[in-house]
Amino acid sequence: DAVAEPKLLFDGYFSNVAYAFPHDAVKFVTYDALKRSVLTSMLPTPVASVIEGAIAGAISELVTSPLDVTRTRVMSKKADVYQEY
């Protein structure tokens, strides 16, 4: 169907936004909280920033991993075919 095909370009867009927003929000809030921690005063600034960024990224991935799985499944499904995982 020629009308439905352009719509398929946006299939999964909502799930992508639903994943990206919480992922970035958790990452930035966690990073900001870690920047105010004791770690910054104990280590040189670049080293502390790398460690804080790594911890914030890991926490963000841990929290939003189920959303990432859902997003990937929605975006990789075949049109008009339901497949249970």
Image (cartoon, rainbow, N blue to C red):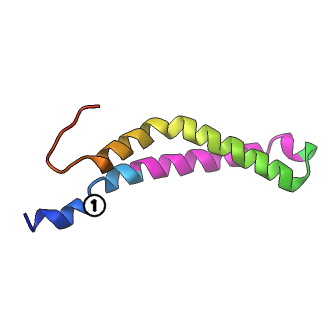
Residue linked to disc 1: 10
Location of residue 14 with respect to 70 vertically, above or below = below
Q: Which quadrant holds the N terminus?
A: bottom left
Which residue is nearer to you in this view: 40 or 67? 67
Question: Is residue 34 inside the magenta stretch?
Answer: yes
Q: Residue at x 27, y 61 (%)?
A: 10
- In this view, the residue farthest toward the top is 85
Q: Is residue 20 left or right of residue 42?
A: left
- In this view, the residue farthest toward the left is 1
Q: Is residue 80 left or right of residue 49?
A: left
Q: Residue at x 56, y 35 (%)?
A: 62
What is the x, y in percent for residue 51?
Answer: 78, 45
What is the x, y in percent for residue 72?
Answer: 37, 45
Location of residue 47 with respect to 10 vertically, above or below = above
Which residue is nearer to you in this view: 67 or 69? 69
What is the x, y in percent for residue 58?
Answer: 63, 40
Q: Residue at x 21, y 48 (%)?
A: 78
Q: Which kind of residue does numbered mark 1 sit on?
A: Phe
Mark 1, secondary structure of its residue: loop
What is the x, y in percent for residue 53?
Answer: 71, 49
Q: Residue at x 84, y 56 (%)?
A: 46
Give the main secondary structure, helix, strand or loop, of the magenta stretch.
Answer: helix
Crowding near pointer 1: few (<14 within 10 Å), some, many (20+)?
few
Q: Is residue 16 left or right of residue 56?
A: left
Q: Which residues are magenta?
A: 18-40
Q: Which quadrant holds the C terminus?
A: top left
Looking at the image, how many numbered discs can be counted on the residues?
Answer: 1
